[in-house]
Image (cartoon, grey):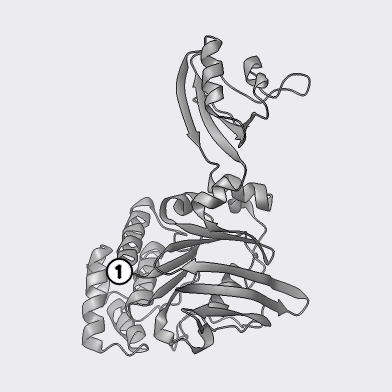
Amino acid sequence: MSLVLDGLVKRFGAVTALDGISFEVPKGEVFGFLGANGAGKTTTMRIVLDILRPDSGIATWEGTPTTHVPRETWGYLPEERGLYPRLQVLDQLVFFASLYGIPRDVAATRAREWLARLRIPDYATRRAEELSKGNQQKVQLIAAILHEPAVLLMDEPFVGLDPVNVALLKEAFGEMRERGSTLIFSTHQMEMVEELCEAVALIDRGKLVLAGPIREVKRSTGRRVVRLALDGKTIEAGTPDGGATSIPWLDSIPGVRVSRAGQDYAELEVPRDVDPELVLRTALEHGERVTNFLIADPSIEEIFIERVGRPPASAEEKHLAGSVSAPAAAGSAAPVRAASEPPR
């Protein structure tokens, strides 16, 4: 059983945020949801959570429309933090868990356990406004998972985290995955997708570009990548008047081109119908001393750039409204944005 999106369409006035989005997220997997800012990722998540309703199409979980799935099925980590700034961390974690029917003593025990796992046990009695952005992010994650949801949706969970906190968050993901949770997260950090995800979907301007297991997505490009380094030589792309590369014998291999040049090694794109080991054999035949040779599929970032036409970190500016946060407490500054604004 799985989460299935079938033909989702959502418009905001003249803006079509989603245009027939369909893909499947297998139960119990870690799924990467990719796209430039404004592509429609947050809109899709909100439809799954029944915060927004699609103009047409349907989202189902284990065969049941998500509009009829119990609220406690879902956990949601929005990009914008929705904590009460002046409320102590433990008190608000217990409060958020109580919204899902978790008894206060059970919620407090779970909250303290997670605070310890994420290395902030002493922050239980601190006010949220006293925490760094990274630690607020960890508290927000705990708030999303204390009721032990079957599906956890996260919007840019790694934004603003230092390497130590990124590692802790990845450990938490692994634990939830082992417990059987389905994890879906959007990110511009493609290395996180490569490391954590079993499958991905990429959308651009409201349209689905590709979806499926990462291995199949990479192989669908029809090419392989060879990492090559030659002793004493730098491999670069050729000039318009010369060959495709700066190494004449490489031009004898059909379709090979330099996709990334560097002092340590170069990455060569090799068509799927060409044996990549031909590069190594040809190099040795020409007396080259090969110091690095590795065959791989294109990276997810390379596929993203190829299909969307721009790097994920330099996509167009956000033009859609933010995530649903916790309702603002008296005197707090936790905003709730209007659902009528064009969403991300």
Say if residue 321 shows up in the picture: no
Nearer to the camera, 39 or 159: 39
Q: Residue at x 45, y 59 (%)?
A: 160
Nearer to the camera, 101 or 22: 22
In the rendered view, tell whether residue 174 sits above or below residue 265: below
Measured as percent of width and height from the top left, residue 22 is found at 61, 69
Q: Secondary structure at mark 1?
A: loop
In the rendered view, tell whether residue 148 sits above or below residue 308: below
Measured as percent of width and height from the top left, residue 329 is found at 43, 87
Q: Residue at x 35, y 63 (%)?
A: 173
Counting other residues with Cα less than 10 Å from the Cα at mark 1, is it few (<14), some (14-19), or many (20 or more)?
Answer: few
* Label 1 sits on residue: 179
Measured as percent of width and height from the top left, residue 107 is found at 26, 82
Say if residue 217 shows up in the picture: yes
Nearer to the camera, 123 or 95: 95
- Label 1 is placed on what type of residue? Arg
Measured as percent of width and height from the top left, residue 279 is found at 56, 23
Is 44 situated left or right of 81 in this image?
Answer: right
Q: Residue at x 50, y 89 (%)?
A: 68
The quadrant where residue 120 appears: bottom left
In the rendered view, tell whether residue 259 sits above or below residue 95: above
Residue furthest out toward the top: 287
The quadrant where residue 273 appears: top right
